[in-house]
Amino acid sequence: MTTKKLARFSPTFTITPAMAISLMRIEAVRQAIRTLPITPRVLANLRETARLFSTHYSTMIEGNRLTQEQVARVIERAQHFPGRERDENEVRGYYAALDEVERTAKRRERISVAIVRKVHALVMAGGKTRVKPTAWRDGQNVIRDARSKGIVYMPPESKDVPELMEQLISWLNAKDELPVPVKAGIVHYQFATIHPYYDAGPVSGSVRSEGSLCARRILCPRSEGIL
């Protein structure tokens, strides 16, 4: 019995005029910031603020009930909020994952299956930094409507997940002329389409998206600036 090989990942997309304008604005701001005389101390503060903001708003998508100020207290002071244990673990995990993608970018490593699995493990580990990379799902999962509970999307079969993820990672690492925000958006979309984990939701997808941005040295600070 032969196994049918999946088609190579080659996304079809359109950059609209509005998107093009936004991309130009992003690049203009990036260049402007790179020329600013930012001290190491200010740079460190900016990086930390950006991580905390990202942690708050990305986990809020999943229904996290902690405020922006509470997220900062959980991360910076290990403060505990009674009845919010799940929310605390979620922000700790997300924050730890952001740290990992930044370290990966600074090492200029190519994104790999191992890195993706480790980042997901960090997201789910509640702040622990010694984690075992999470394996892909080994069964079928479905996306249900929150109200009706009806199935709204059925991801690919689990047997296809390893090859689909290998293709996505290979496409991400390939050199091309695509604007980085566009490439990151496509990675996020395709990751959600494959749904390689039973629990892979917006938070995990957001981390992958930011990881691809960091890997291309857009979000990760440089020594002479924050972009």
Image (cartoon, rainbow, N blue to C red):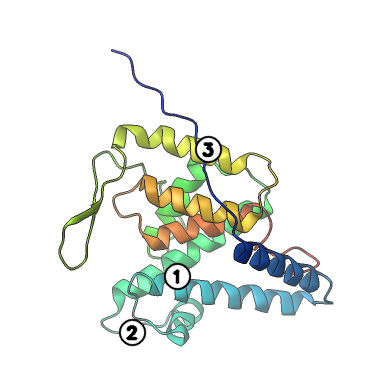
The residue that label 3 is drawn on is 10
Name the secondary structure under disc 1: helix
- Mark 3 vs 2, N-terminal side: 3
Q: Where is residue 134 in the image (x, y as percent from the top left)?
A: 38, 46
User: What residue is at 77 percent from the left and 74 percent from the top?
Assistant: 40
How many angstroms separate mark 2 from mark 1 (CA)?
19 Å
The residue that label 2 is drawn on is 81
Q: In which quarter of the image is residue 125?
A: bottom left
Q: CB atoms at circles 3 and 2 under 8 Å apart?
A: no
Name the secondary structure under disc 3: loop
Q: Which of 206 and 148 is in front in this view?
A: 148
Q: Nearer the viewer, residue 90 or 185?
A: 185
Q: Where is residue 181 in the image (x, y as percent from the top left)?
A: 61, 58
Q: Position of residue 48 (x, y in %)?
A: 60, 75
The residue that label 1 is drawn on is 58
Name the secondary structure under disc 2: loop
User: What residue is at 41 percent from the left and 28 percent from the top?
Assistant: 6
- Mark 2 vs 1, N-terminal side: 1
Query: Which amino acid does the dot numbered 1 rest on?
Result: Ser
Query: Which amino acid does the dot numbered 2 rest on?
Result: Phe
User: What residue is at 74 percent from the left and 68 percent from the top?
Assistant: 30
Q: CB atoms at circles 2 and 1 under 8 Å apart?
A: no
Query: Which amino acid does the dot numbered 3 rest on?
Result: Ser
Q: Position of residue 149 (x, y in %)?
A: 16, 61
